Every structure is written in structure tokens, then in C-alpha cells.
Amino acid sequence: MGRSDELTDKDLLRIIKEMSKSAHEEGLAEEEEFLFQLPEVEEELDEFYFSENDGTVEVKDGKIIVRDPVNDGRSAKIKVLPPIILMKNGQPVEGTVMVSSTDQLEWQIEDTPLYELKVTEDNMCVTLTVFALKKCKLELVDAEPVHCLALRVKEVKEEMRELTTSEVYADLVKLKVKRELIKLSVIHREIRNPSYQPVCVVEGVPPVEGKDGSLELFVSTKVEEALEEVQGKVDFRNRLKIPSVKKGDLIGKIHTAVPGKPGYDVFGQVVHPRPVKEVKVVPRDHVSLNEEGILLAQQAGRPRVTGSGRVKFVDITRTFIVSGNLDIETGNIVFSGDVVVYGDVLDGMTIEALGDVFISGSVFSSTITATGNVTIKGNVVDSSIHSGYFGVIYNQLYQQFSQLLEKFIALETACLTVLKIAYSSGKNVSLGRVLITLMETKFSGIKSMVKKVEELMKQIKEEVPDEIDTVYHELVYYTKPYELMGTSSQSKVKETVSKLKEAITWIESMQVPDADVEISQCTLSQIKANGNILIKGAGTFNSQLLSKENIYFFQLDAVCRGGRVQSGKNIIASMVGGDVGGEVHLIAAEMIKSTQFKNGRITIKGRSEEIFKPIDHLVAYVRDGKLIIESS
């Protein structure tokens, strides 16, 4: 193919420009209208008097006899009262109705059963409810001719029916339940001494539930605080006791799922137990798994369990220790493991840990992000703290990789589109040239994003994890034009997309389920945890707190002034609101408790109320769709 068949730069830029055009869609808003209709109310006056011209109605020997009115007289009426059912010309009527001699009038007594048999929704039980032990036959009471007659009945004592065990048994057989499941003794006892409440007289055999697979830990993974004496003095600096194992120690055991056993319902149909779920345990760095499902430590360190749902990851994590304050001289910390700071975190610093973070001092105007728990023994001022799930999504590498993934997926599509357009027009263009042009135009932002990743890589302390290092070198490739020009395989961008996904998944797997944040107090700060938020000191001041679990204020005089405090379950507070600070808003999914609630706003399950006057020992919850606020 000659030079004239080559795609010109002008044509290539034109194709890319056409691809960048976006279409706008218009949406239409729809409104729903609701029509309400008030029921019509009719009033009827009872008529006690009638003239000889008025029609009459009487009852004689069980028959209803109607005489029509004469001249200007009024038509006769019948009042139908329970348990009578009146049929007028084949149709049931209720209340007070006009009748004539030409009407075909038939009556019957509403059958009130002595008992009721009811099968539960799951077919595992048939209940017997006794309403009465005896029932007499009812008949119409004879009545003299009147203009408006209220039909009445009386009992015929000579014709009485009694409830028996055999009658109930016969009805159960008609239901086609398994006869061997019928509890005759229970039926007999209920008839002899009725409770008039539903009683189970046929009961199926419930399935035996199995056991889900589980991971049993033989060691502690929680960091505890303990004060010890060193040469007669209390060692406050090293009071965080981090659990550790030695090489060869047993970490835990995997228990496989145990299936359940089926049962059957009252009709003999098989009822299967809930399917059991296996737990998938993946040993990672410095952990081995033997054939018996035993996890063994291959080096000394802190055992850690991460992951969510039915997938768990077990490793021996490393610890990065800062013996004093974290400041501009020590630099920011990005570390795949635990971070311990035996001092304060000073203004403008960042800690990003794929593990737990422990700070023995205070945090000032800084950002702490951890995929595990965060413990801060001092104060938190003008800072952002994120743990667990939030530690993942606020992790800068995670954010950069996620944004780059979107870009490279779009880049892959754009490359294929340009090549398709070029080839369809009979022009020849290399993949490398398309990549360079796209990177310099439509996707020019990728280089700056890779540069940001490079800056973050420089902050990683000690060894860079393979999962991060691999994708980093893959990204650097796209910042070198001479290498891009030589790209010939269309699978190159696809491979980059795959490696970005693997790195993102790896960071997500470092999340510790229900990771807590523990602080003493916070001011003008943001705290987010997918576990509990524990406030052990003076309280919170004009701060934003978000917990997927509970929020606890431990001290009786701890305050919560200003800001927004939101919990996925409960908030247990002490002193809420006050004259100092902005308005405080407490939001919970289940319950809010406060020793003294001075003023502020409460929201539970979307129901809100403003509180202006102090309430001691406040308890708030939602019942039957209404917000209940009590003072216990």
C-alpha cells in the first residue's frame, strides 16, 4: 500500500474529535394524581308508628309475610340483623330494606362454626381454635304485623350439637395431612378445657439446620492497651500491646460446612434446610495452610484477618514504627501493614495504612486512613479519620487506580474505534501511533494521574507490595512515547486494565470487617468507620461522625456539641447540645440514648424532631412508624 493510503494526522484528529461529541438526553417528569372519594352516608329513621294504609310485614311459623300498602300508604320495611342472612329475589340484602308481596324473600342463619382449623404459611403446623363447645339450632321468632320489622332468632334447645374429638379428626383427614402427625391428645385436652386460642394439633418435622464453614482463631488479633512498670516507672509511651506470633505458631483452623438434614411438613412434603455456606480462607504473606486446615505462622509478627463476607485473608502483617512525632521531617506514611506513632501527628501530615493505625498522642490538621482499626489516644483537631471500608475508598492509591481504570477502559474502546474507522476507509495506521495521539489529546489527563501515582509510590515505606509495584511499572509504560510507538498488540491496553483491576481488588481485600475508630475527643473533624466509633474522653465538638455500627460516648460528662453524628445502629451519648457551639443533629437507624439532651435535632429511620427544652435520660426510637421520645 503506497504513501497515499496512510491516514494523515489531520484525518486522525478529525476521527478523535468526532468521537468526543456527546449526546444529551431529555427526560420527562411524570406526576401521579390520586383521587379520593368520600363514602356516602345514609341515615334512616326508625319508624315506630304506621297507619292502616301502610304496608306491613310479619313472621309466622318461620315464614315472612308481606302486605302491600293501599292508597298513599308506605311500603313495608325489614331490618336485617346478624346472624340472619336475608335474600331478596335471590340477592343478599343488609340493613333496612323495603319489601313487597311480590318479592321472593328467603332467610337463613349465618353459620358460626364451633372451631377453626388453619394451616400456617410454612405448612409446618395446623392450629385448632375452639370458639364454642355447643351450638343450638336457631329459628325465626314469630312477630305480629308491623310497618318496620326487625327480624330476630331464638335457640331450639331440643336440637343441640356438641364438639367432639372425632369431628375435628375427620376434618383433619379431609385436609389430607399425615395422620401419624395428628396429636389426638392435644385435641381432646383442648375440647375438655378450651383455651379459645390457636393450638397446634398437627406438627411437621422441621429440618435440622447445618453449620456454615468458619474460621476459628487460636490467637488474638486485637491490639490492647496495658500499662507496665519499667524500672519502677509506668511506661506510658509503649502502652499499646500488639499481639504477635512466633514462627511455627498455630494461628487458626478452618472448619468446613456441615450440611443439615431435611424434614417434612404436615402434608408429608420434604422441607430442605438452609443451604450451608463454605468459608474461603486464603493464606497470604508468611502464613501456610496444611491439609488439616491448620494455619501456621511462617515468621514472627502480628496475625491479621481481613476480607469481608465468606472470603477471609490471613497474613502476618508488618509494623512501621515512628518513635516520636510524625512531622514534615519524617514525611507522610504510606505502608502495607500497621503504623504505630509514639507521639503526635502534626499539621498537614498523612498516614495511609493497609492495616491498623495506633497513635499514642494527638492528631492536628492531618488525614489518617486505614483499612483496619484506628486508635488515637489523644485529641483529634481539624482532621479526617477513616477506617475499614472508608479506609479503602479514601486510600489515595485506591482512588488513583480506580480513576485510571475508567480511563484505560475508555482508552481501549477508543483505540478499537479509531482503528475500525481507519481500516474501513482503506487507510493504514499503527496502534502505537493511535495510542500516542489519543494520549496527547482525548486522554491527556492519564499522564498527570500516573505522575500522582509515582509521587505516592515514593511515600511508601520499606518494601513496595508486588501487587502495587506491578501495576505501577505497567502505568509508567504509557508515559514513554518511544515505547508507545512500538506497541503492536491490541491486547496491551486490555492487559493494563486487568492489572489495574487486580490491584484494586487487592487493596479492597485488605479491609478489616467492622473496623473501629477509637479517640479521646475531636474538634472540627470528620470521622468515618465501618465499625464502631468509640469516644473515650471529653467528647465531640462541631465534627462530622459516620459509623456503620454504633457510636458510644463513654464518660458521663462527655459532650456532643455541634455537627452531625450518624450511626447505622445506635447512638449512646451523655451530654448533647448546649449554649456553646452550633446545632447538633443525631441520626440513627435503631435507637438514641442520652443522659441529658439539652437541644438539637433527632432523626431515626427518617422520622425527625427538633428538641428545644432539656430532656434527662432521653430514649428515642421508632415504633409503628412514629418517632417515640421518652424520658426514662
Image (cartoon, helix red, strand yellow):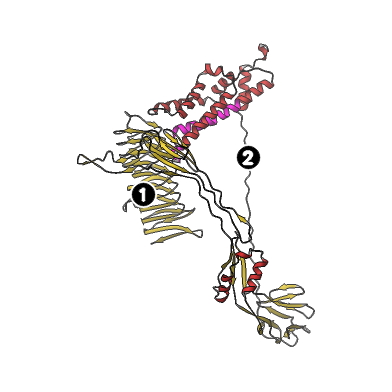
Q: Which residue lies furthest to the left in this view?
A: 232
Camera-side residue: 31 or 107? Answer: 107
Q: Where is residue 117 in the image (x, y as percent from the top left)?
A: 62, 68
At a point 32% along the width and 29% down the height, the residue shown is 330
Asked if 393 appears above or below 68 in the picture, the reply is above
Q: Position of residue 36 (x, y in %)?
A: 63, 60
Tell me, yes or no, whether the highlighted magenta stretch contains residue 443. no
Q: Position of residue 2 (x, y in %)?
A: 67, 11
Whether residues under marks 1 and 2 lie with C-beta atoms below 8 angstroms apart, the answer is no
Is label 1 in a helix, a strand or a loop?
strand
Span shown in magenta: 389-414
Q: Which residue lies furthest to the front in this view?
A: 292
Other-residue count near label 2 (Cα within 10 Å), few / some / many at <14 / 14–19 / ≥20: few
- Residue 597 visible here: no
Q: Earlier in the sequence, mark 1 or mark 2?
A: 2
Q: Distance between the residues labelled 1 and 2?
A: 45 Å
Asked if 19 appears above or below 9 in the picture, the reply is below
Label 1: which residue? 561
Camera-side residue: 33 or 263? Answer: 263
Label 2: which residue? 26
Asked if 119 appears above or below 20 in the picture, the reply is below
In the picture, which quadrant includes the N terminus? top right
- Residue 267 visible here: yes
Side (left or right) of 42 relative to 53: left
Res 99 quadrant in image: bottom right
Amino acid marked by disc 1:
Arg
Amino acid marked by disc 2:
Glu
Res 217 quadrant in image: top left
Q: How many marks can you see?
A: 2
Is label 2 in a helix, a strand or a loop?
loop
Camera-side residue: 147 or 280? Answer: 280
Q: Residue furthest top?
A: 2
